[in-house]
Amino acid sequence: STSNWTWWAAACGVTGSLVGLGLGLVCCVYVATLHENDLWFSNIKEVEREISFRTECGLYYSYYKQMLKAPSIQQGLIELVSDNLTESRRTINLLQRMNIYQEVFLSVLYRVLPIQEYLEPVYFYIYTVFALQAVYVIALFITSWLLSGSWLAGALTGVWYILNRVDTTRVEFTVSLRENWSLPFFALQVAAITCYLRPQLKPIHQRVVLWLIFLSTFCFCLMWQFNQFILFVQALVIFALDGLDLITHKQVTSLYLVQVFSLLCVWILQFCNSMILCSLALSFIVAALFVKHFQKGLKSGGLVVRLGKLLLHSLLVVALTFCMNYLAKKVLWLQSDEHIFKFIKAKFGLGATRDFDASLYLCEEAFGLLPLDTFERLAGTLLLYPYVSALGVLLLLLALVSLGNLSSAITQAKCFLAVFLGGKRMKYLWTGHMCAFAAYGVCGREVWELCLKVVRCSSQTKLRLIRYTVPIVILAFLYYKFWPKLTEEISELREFYDPDTVELMTWISAKTPKSAVFAGSMQLLAGIKLCTGRVLTNHPHYEDKALRERTRQVYQIYARQSPEEVHRILRAAGADYVVLEDSICYERRHRRGCRLRDLLDLANGHIMDGEGDNDPDLVIAPDPRFCEVIKTDSAVYTALFTRVFKNKTFHVYRLKKAKKKAKLERQATEGPV
């Protein structure tokens, strides 16, 4: 009866909701436990905890710490808006330059909530990030449930996400990376869009869902500087669906406007950051809406005529997009993101490059091609097979039937796959949604209906039986195979151990003035700012042309340069101390041509170290490598630099004042009196 069916649907809904919440909580506890066990976080010193925020993670966390130390919230905000500690001799607006509103919000929340006596600031921070992993899993759970109509798909999604942790997230060891904050909101946005494109949704529900799309898109954009590239992919998907007449004009316009308003709200909050106005996503959306408005009759006529119109429409939008983007960058004098396009150009083999910034990205493992063992791991958890099968079957269905809610999932899955294959770091954007899509393939009606029709045994009973039996069998297999490994992983205990870095940070805090300016590698300097509060010459947030140029100049400490030239460069950046790292000076992690010293040699036109070919136009450097020869304490170096600290990993030198340098030069010229 209708009453019994209503009760059954309600029971299924409650059960599915509880399962989704449970899986989100399990994921949260799982990554928090791994983080604790890997570092013994609760038992190490405060300086060791802060050092564990490696590279740019330390830079972002330092602003949370800075806000908490400020006398008031207002004073803390003023210090962020007029910051002169992050880049020496420069005052910058951190809220404009960086996506750190989450640190600001969390610090304010910690101040106003009555939790100071029960929870340390660092735990409030990391637990919030881990809790967002629960949000991520729940959002994926909802997406697969909406697509398939079965909460078993959501359960399979959550289990796959947890079992493929190595490929779905790295939150447990890079807690404060921007992607760990933003991707959960992106998953919420995808779930909301999936709901919005359902054909049976009522108008009032559409408006509510549109607001959810806006809020999730806004949070996603606010928390990650690379949001424009992800939104650009989404805009392309919407454009393709519109061109193939798979979603309505109202849906297309609404989704475009949500993206535009989200970007503009972030633009306002980031004090009119020109990178947002000059983003490809914004240029493309404006171009698509403009051309769509004036090009009437696009979806009329025969097949050949419509294809011709669609091709012309696409060419017009692309041409207008690049024209608008080019003009916007010229008008606003934007050069902050040029290194990204240089990297993309070199990545796709459109000419070799010696550009230092582009090469720095190309040589990083995170931006390299995806290792093949990734697919082996995904296949080992049975994730890859249903994903590929579902993608193939649904592409066939897409060619035959125009189902708006189905086609959007396929198109976005393909686009994410292309982005994922292009760079290892971007796989974390794709693999989570891969879990949801593969689970839909296992539990969805469309795939199994087609398969049963092919073997000519289609019936509703058989369809229902197979849709519920297969995911239960897969879940049972995954439990049997991976539960012992998970329990062993959770029980494995380690401890943070980096005595050389701890010794360096302790020495800097105790033996140098609070106003001292430090030069060195971007990664180390982020830690120095967090642990000691000293002023930096450069840092890992690379989205600024002037900072990139300064970083390249400071890195001449690892190039073949004279001590006079290095001293001049460091003094121009305002440095009082320079930290040299043996791990960079004698680097072996990268192959020849990708070591930092090689990138500097190539950019300077010098022949690289070691055996191997060199381009014919490269010349032998007139000076030895600075980071090596300075350790000999020869007179020409000691006249400009004084070693003040040394351990197995780090060498710290204090720069001598210009007056003292001039006096030494005069004495050397005039001789003894």
Image (spheres, grey):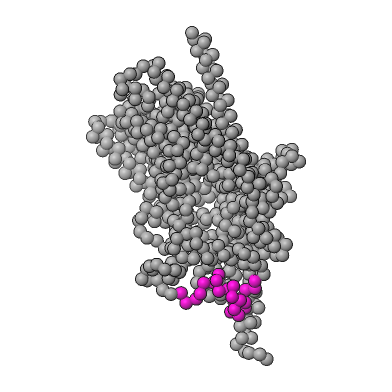
Foreground residue, 645 or 140? 645
The structure residue drawn at horizontal position 56% and vertical position 37%, both measured from the top left corner, is: 486
Q: Position of residue 94 (x, y in %)?
A: 60, 52
Tell which residue pokes out farthest to the right in this image.
Answer: 117
Q: Position of residue 389 (x, y in %)?
A: 37, 33
> Residue 283's image quarter?
top left
Q: Is residue 640 magenta?
A: yes
Task: Confirm whether residue 248 shows in the render.
Answer: no
Query: In this picture, is 638 found above or below 229?
Result: below
Query: In this picture, is 215 found above or below 145?
Result: below
The structure residue drawn at horizontal position 51% and vertical position 60%, both measured from the top left corner, is: 548
Q: Position of residue 643 (x, y in %)?
A: 65, 71
The structure residue drawn at horizontal position 57% and vertical position 57%, both measured from the top left corner, is: 523
> Residue 25's image quarter?
top right
Q: Is residue 219 magenta?
A: no
The structure residue drawn at horizontal position 48% and vertical position 48%, both measured from the top left corner, is: 425
Task: Confirm whether residue 424 shows in the render.
Answer: yes
The stretch of residues the image draws in magenta is 621-643
Foreground residue, 293 or 653? 653
Judged left or right of residue 667, residue 239 is left
Tell which residue pokes out farthest to the bottom in this image.
Answer: 673
Q: Position of residue 137 (x, y in %)?
A: 54, 34
> Residue 491's image quarter?
top right
